[in-house]
Amino acid sequence: MSIPLPRTWVRDADGSPYDVDNLPYGVVSTRGTGGDAARVGVRIGDRVLDLGAAARELRPEWTPLLTAPELNPLLAAGPARWAEVRAWVRTLLTDVAHASKLRLLGLDEVTCHLPVRVGDYVDFYASEHHATNIGRILRPDGAALAPNWKHLPVGYHGRAGSIVVSGTGVRRPTGQRKAPEADAPTFGPSTRLDIEAELGFVVGRSVPWGERVAVSDFERTVFGVAGINDWSARDIQAWEYVPLGPHLGKSFATTMSAWVTPLAALAAARVPVPGQDVALVEYLREDEPQGYDITVEVELNGTVVARAPYRSMYWSPAQMLAHLTVNGASLRAGDLYASGTISGPEPDQLGSLMELSAGGTRPFTAGGAQRTFLADGDEVVLHCSAPGARGRIGLGEVRGTILPAR
């Protein structure tokens, strides 16, 4: 006989994408002139449990972890503490005896902050469908995939200081761009501004310089996941990326969800990655399913233009992590690495406007208008979700509006 899953006493939270099977962490402060300092909170339905206040009242030994203005102290406390805190939070929210002792805040009462202090940021290129599509657009007469692509997870180091929390406006970047028929580049605002629907992985364990992380160490190294929009200026990127790769076309802004969903909430979403058809070097080989059945819904000005399936990714997050550290590169609690654009095999599963518009040659409809790349005032929202123990859980939205270039 199956044991009934516990239900929360929080009104309207049962059946929500943010029920007690989820419990993502964020950093919040109370709005208004008398607002509190930023501290850790957990989302339950449309409310936020003030974990800082709960720790001061009920678990003072955890106060340094949960009253901090970032998740980094909790991340650095390690997997055993992550499990203890999550179990405690579930008890608080399922035992009505705790109801009178807890401070619940409405989402409209709080300001959400960037949840982690990101030390290093690495962005990968892990979708075979996306890499193939982009290769065909940029190199129509050449091979879509580079010779190394199926042998290692291709990636580049991004700019941690340009990572912003969901809801932050994104300024149109300015830089050099060169038209194919032009003899020289021009300087000005990007005219081919794009999105990249991605999934980010938040590191929770410091690993000293010189050590490696095995694929089997993924779950004790990564704390959780968050939705990512890695905005891209395709015209700036096209002119600068040869021979050293992305730079100013990517570093101007990366938007991260305000909520980090712990890996423990995603047990029901584990799936194998699609078949990898090239023999891999030993450090990249996996013995168990390391993919996730997560969907990223892309909304442009109120119109859903794609539903990108993370389960279709060629490289798993464990393989990306192993490759990131195989040369001895260090990790710190709060480091972030992202999947790269998530795209599936179908036309409605493409996680970038570059793909949806075939490089700007085939407009699509959004908000009642024909579109290719982003215009000033456009609002993009990514909605991430995954199967949970009794329904789909939400991984937090990723929202951004394009502001005019300065």
Image (spheres, rainbow, N blue to C red):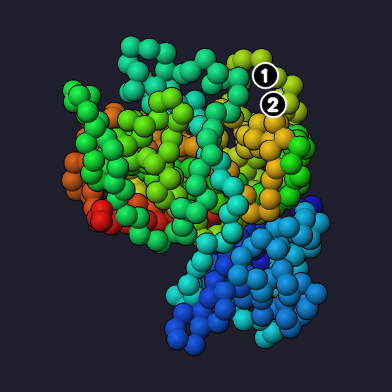
Q: Name the residue rendered at 33%, 40% in the picture.
A: 233
Q: Name the residue rendered at 61%, 65% in the picture.
A: 70
Viewer-nearest residue: 149 or 244: 244
Q: Name the residue rendered at 68%, 53% in the picture.
A: 333
Q: Is residue 303 left or right of residue 143?
A: left
Q: Is residue 388 visible?
A: no
How many numbered circles are shown? 2
Crowdedness near tag 2: few (<14), some (14–19) or many (≥20) residues, C-alpha within 10 Å: many
Q: Is residue 246 above or below residue 200?
A: above
Say what secondary structure mark 1 lies in: loop
Residue located farthest toward the front when viewing the structure as drawn: 184
Q: Is residue 366 above or below residue 45?
A: above
Residue behind mark 1: 280
Q: Is residue 362 above or below residue 371?
A: above
Q: Quadrant of the C terminus?
A: bottom left
Give residue 351's position: percent from left, percent from top.
40, 38
Residue behind mark 2: 284
Q: Amino acid at mark 2?
A: Leu
Q: Is residue 357 left or right of residue 34?
A: left
Q: Are marks 1 and 2 in contact (CB under 8 Å)?
A: yes
- Marks 1 and 2 sit apart, C-alpha to C-alpha, by 6 Å
Viewer-nearest residue: 114 or 44: 114
Q: Kindly indicate the quadrant of the structure image that contains residue 43.
A: bottom right
Viewer-nearest residue: 317 or 72: 72
Give residue 169's position: percent from left, percent from top.
35, 59
Q: Amino acid at mark 1?
A: Leu
